[in-house]
Image (cartoon, coloured by chain):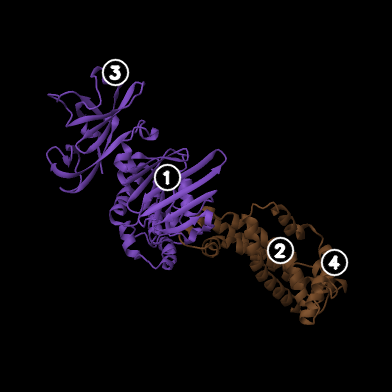
Amino acid sequence: MNLGPLWLSVQLAAITMLLLLVICTPLSWWLARTASRMKPAAQAIVALPIVLPPTVMGFYLLILLGPSGAIGAWWVRLTGDALTFTFGGLVIASCLYSLPFAVQPLMNAFESVDKRNLEAAWTLGATRRDAFFSVALPQSTRGYFAAAVLSFAHTLGEFGVVLMVGGNIPGETRVISIAIYDQVESLNYAAAHQLSGVLLVLAFVMLLAMFVMNRRWQRQ
Amino acid sequence: MSHDTLSIQFALSRPGFSLDVSLDVPMRGVTGLFGASGAGKTTLLRCIAGLERPESGRLVVAGQTWQDDEAHVSRPVHARDIGYVFQEPRLFAHLDVRGNLQYGRQRSSANGRRLELDAVVELLGLQGLLDRQTAGLSGGEAQRVAIARALLRAPRLILMDEPLASLDAARKDEILPFLDRLHAELATPILYVSHNIDEVCRLCDHLVVIEGGRVVADGELQSVLVRMDVPSLSGEEAGSVIAGSVSGYDAEYDLTSIRFSGGEFRVPGHHAGTGSPLRLRIRASDISLCRGKPAQSTILNILSATIDEIEDAQGATRLLRLRVGEERMLARITRRSCDELELRQGDRVEAQIKAVAVRGF
């Protein structure tokens, strides 16, 4: 069994997950705390990847990231490389694709951080930033765990967006879902079975871990 | 601008409520902010801490300007040197007791002062709790940890917002002795919000009365308490505090004698050693008056008094202010008795105070 595509998927999912945890922290904090009239609009934009067909997202990203697209052209000028059909492009696409799966659990966790605890921290000499890192963050570990598992698992399972933006380049953009599609197309069912089985078990184990942890925390 | 004064001016309006306060408070001892629920005491405290944004405000703490909205000066909450004790303990659940105590202490190095953890732990009786999780603490223990946490910030000013309000009577009695110790041993001034007059009489040296978002009286505790023009001090709970010192203890009858400028009081129980200062709280409705000394009475405390002022009220009862030695007391009697005895301002009367009704602390 050629495990190259699996390894590529795991790398993509891990990098995407780490980036999302960093990016979504300020975004989710703002969403959880703001009274701004822009909040519903921001929430709708964040949730778009859940309802949009991956092909639609992939199509827009292909245009945006392409060498003549706004982001793609800038990237070419900066690095000399294109973003489409590269691993870098996949990372950007995956971050957008899995964004809601990181934002939602973090937002829920931040919403349940008691404002009164933050006030207490400020009166004890903590700046807003200090209070966030020393009180809000440690009280939101459950949210971070859920955001990590969900964004990792969701990225591992992406197909449409990857196909549109990344294509099917071995070692660069051929992730596990693409490889399975390939094997099925060429009627190589045995290989398709093996890769699918690995993905199925992996997904189940990750979700199981999350729900087991949830139950344990609830009992505490 | 005096260095021993806390100068407070805040104006704020919210739907159905407005606060307009201008007040100077001494930077020593315990100052009670007393008033009914909804009078604006908590809002005022939050303004001082910087947790509330008033329309206009000015706050000068011992010569340091913390807020002056006209000059666009306003220190953020973390830069105001306060220790805030909230109604609920607000302990951090992700830290144990020690972690909670260290939280403020670690951040106090900025003001160049740091208190020793052990001293504060000792002061609030927290030995043995340090390694406990906060979830397992009783209400009284949690509130003591919260008080210690605020003290360990080594603040210039301590703000306490009804720290006993969320506790039952037994827990209150558990904490009050610790608050007495703070009062006695701590040089840091405390602003103490309460709607409980007994707490105020026990703990405070200075009293500010707030009604409907306005200051209606402020000054030294004993003189404010006997003002008859302050509605929240002349109702059911009207009374006075006199300060004396213990002059002896009668073990046979379990009575403590307390000497003050107007004579001697006897109260049940054993209070402090001879010579120790003791405050007595006497409710106006526990005093009765007669002309001339009664020959036989079950009342232990009979003091010669002069009528200072008689309330001009047409209800069933009247409030009188008496002068006893250098102290003043309030007495509430029926209007009928007042008329029958033809009591007038300046008259000499005998004030009888039931010993069991007097609270000593």
Circle 2 marks a residue in which chain?
A
The residue that disc 3 covers is B336
To the question of a shared chain for discs 3 and 2, the answer is no
Name the secondary structure under disc 3: helix
Distance between mark 3 and mark 2 Cα atoms: 80 Å
Name the secondary structure under disc 1: loop
Identify the colour of chain B in the image. Answer: purple
Distance between mark 2 and mark 1 Cα atoms: 43 Å
The residue that disc 1 covers is B166
Distance between mark 4 and mark 2 Cα atoms: 18 Å
- Place residue A176 in its image quadrant: bottom right
The residue that disc 2 covers is A99
Q: Looking at the picture, how far across and down is residue A50, in whole percent?
A: 76, 58
To the question of a shared chain for discs 2 and 1, the answer is no
Instruction: Classify mark 4: residues with Cα within 10 Å, few (<14), some (14-19) or many (20+).
Output: some
To the question of a shared chain for discs 4 and 1, the answer is no
Q: Is residue A35 left or right of residue B317?
A: right
Distance between mark 1 and mark 3 Cα atoms: 41 Å
Instruction: Classify mark 1: residues with Cα within 10 Å, few (<14), some (14-19) or many (20+).
Output: some
- Report the amino acid beneath label 2: Leu
- Report the amino acid beneath label 3: Arg
Badge nearest the viewer, 3 or 2: 3
Label of residue A59 in the image? 4
- Find out whether the residues at labels 3 and 4 contact each other: C-beta distance under 8 Å: no
Q: Which chain is brown?
A: A
